[in-house]
Image (cartoon, helix red, strand yellow):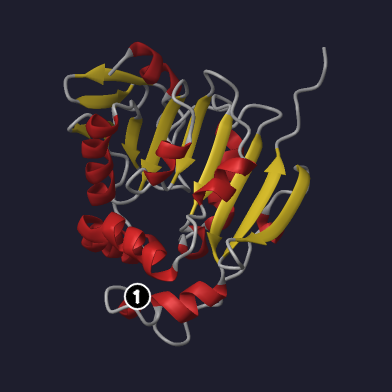
């Protein structure tokens, strides 16, 4: 692990810094140790609730995830929605970018080549697949297994922070939003995209691979605009991808002038 990457990390629970100790990250204050597996630090410990449920789902569907998405858009004759998501991002040359819930990394192919990309996901299987694709794409990325509600990064270190697909069913979406704000630099635009109720009803509840995780009576999906702290600026929400997704955007206030 490069020293620059290490300098951006902190214990997601105590916020203390790390030191690299063999194939582990060691909390310099408490001694707590987090393992590194195949170059990916692991910050997931004991999961409960929705996070445990959906980690199981994505670990199971990871091998066929990319193919299923490709076939879906081919059969439906629909353009890939990722262009609409990327259009919302503000990415300057050389920016340090964090995607929370990175999955198999499909969004990276739509982003500039010169960025410093960080991706975090709950599912080891999704991250492992992403890691193998990086060699094929000749791209670099720093990957981490962790929870959106416990981001292992220092305050105000990312120029761009975004999330696509998943927050509807996070165990703690409100805390996850606060964590994205925590790691974003002042003035950063934060983008959160997820499926609407229509997708859950018409796709996930009918798909043999996912319907057991979305039974009838599943809690209604909604855009979490009410969970955005009131001090955030330019808070907006709209539907994209023909109503299949909502796009929530807001800006972290800039630092006061000295």
Q: Residues within 10 Å of mark 1 (few under 14, many from 20)?
A: some
Q: Which residue is mark 1?
A: 213
Q: Is residue 77 visible?
A: yes
Residue 167 vertical position relative to residue 142 in the rendered view, above or below = below
Please state which of residues 229 and 125 is positioned toward the viewer in this rendering. 125
Q: Position of residue 95 (x, y in %)?
A: 54, 22
For the C terminus, give its image quadrant.
top right
| Residue 254 percent across, percent down from the top left | 75, 27
Q: Is residue 23 left or right of residue 182?
A: left
Q: Which is nearer the eye, 189 or 106?
A: 106
* Residue at the far right in the pictured view: 257
Q: Residue 5 versus residue 133: which sits nearer the camera?
A: 133
- Residue under the image location 66 percent in, 32 percent down: 188
Task: Give percent across and percent down for residue 133.
Answer: 25, 38
User: Which picture quadrant has residue 70?
Assistant: bottom left
Is residue 40 visible in this depiction of the protein?
Answer: no
Q: Quadrant of residue 119?
A: top left
x then y, percent, for residue 44 = 31, 46
Question: In this rendering, would 233 be left or right of 238?
Answer: right
What residue is at 39 percent from the left and 41 percent from the top?
120
Look at the picture and state if 29 lies above or below 188: above
- In this rendering, would 176 be left or right of 88? left
């Amino acid at each position: 692990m490069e020293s620059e990457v290490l300098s951006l990390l902190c214990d997601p629970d105590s916020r203390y810094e790390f030191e690299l100790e063999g194939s582990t990250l060691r909390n310099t204050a408490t001694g707590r140790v987090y393992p590194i597996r195949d170059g990916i630090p692991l910050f997931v410990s004991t999961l409960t609730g929705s996070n445990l449920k959906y980690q199981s789902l994505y670990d199971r569907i990871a091998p066929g995830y990319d193919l299923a998405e490709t076939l879906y858009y081919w059969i439906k004759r629909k353009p890939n929605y990722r262009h609409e998501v990327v259009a919302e991002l503000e990415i300057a040359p050389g920016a340090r970018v964090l995607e929370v819930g990175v999955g198999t990394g499909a969004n990276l192919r739509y982003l500039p080549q010169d960025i410093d990309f960080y991706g975090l996901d709950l599912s080891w299987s999704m991250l492992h697949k992403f890691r193998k694709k990086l060699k094929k794409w000749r791209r670099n990325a720093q990957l981490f297994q962790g929870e959106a509600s416990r981001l292992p990064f220092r305050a105000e270190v990312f120029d761009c922070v975004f999330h696509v697909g998943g927050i509807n069913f996070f165990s703690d979406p409100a805390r996850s939003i606060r964590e994205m704000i925590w790691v974003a630099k002042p003035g950063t635009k934060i983008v959160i995209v997820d499926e609407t109720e229509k997708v859950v009803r018409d796709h996930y509840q009918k798909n043999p691979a996912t319907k057991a995780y979305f039974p009838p009576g599943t809690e209604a999906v909604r855009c979490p605009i009410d969970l955005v702290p009131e001090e955030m600026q330019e808070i907006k929400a709209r539907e994209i991808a023909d109503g299949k997704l909502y796009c929530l955007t807001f800006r972290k206030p800039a630092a006061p002038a000295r």
